[in-house]
Amino acid sequence: MECNNKQKNLERCNCTYSSCNKTGICCECLRYHLATRELPACCFPDEVEKTYDRSFRAFAKAWSL
């Protein structure tokens, strides 16, 4: 799938998984992660994203006060 916004999306994408073919294609990334009961990298602070734990539990822990 071609994405007209890919270059713009890449400026804000913090995904560090180097072999991901969905990087910069937000709709594909979101669809993939939700189907696997996860959230994409952009939902996490950089230090949490680097752990590759994209679970809802990791999300809640990262943003808890």
Image (cartoon, rainbow, N blue to C red):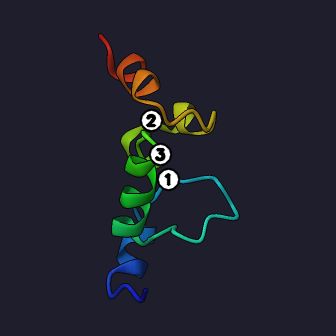
Q: Is residue 24 left or right of residue 19?
A: left
Q: Which residue is mark 2?
A: 45
Q: CA distance from mark 3 to mark 2?
A: 20 Å
Mark 3: amino acid? Thr
Which quadrant does the C terminus fall into?
top left
The dot on residue 14 is: 1
Mark 2: amino acid? Pro
Instruction: Please state the total of marks drawn on the protein image.
Output: 3
The dot on residue 36 is: 3
Mark 1: amino acid? Asn
- Residue 28 position, x and y percent, is 40, 68
Which residue does the image show at 70% across and 64% down from the upper left?
19
Quarter holding residue 50: top right
- Residue 26 position, x and y percent, is 37, 66
- Residue 56 position, x and y percent, is 39, 28
Callout 1 touching callout 3 (CB < 8 Å): no
- Mark 3 vs mark 2: which is more N-terminal? 3
The residue at the far right in this view is 19
- Mark 1 vs mark 3: which is more N-terminal? 1
Which residue does the image show at 51% across and 67% down from the upper left?
23
- Residue 47 position, x and y percent, is 56, 32
Q: Secondary structure at mark 1?
A: loop
- Mark 2 vs mark 1: which is more N-terminal? 1
Callout 2 touching callout 1 (CB < 8 Å): no
Q: Nearer the viewer, mark 1 or mark 3?
A: 3
Which residue does the image show at 41% across and 16% down from the upper left?
61
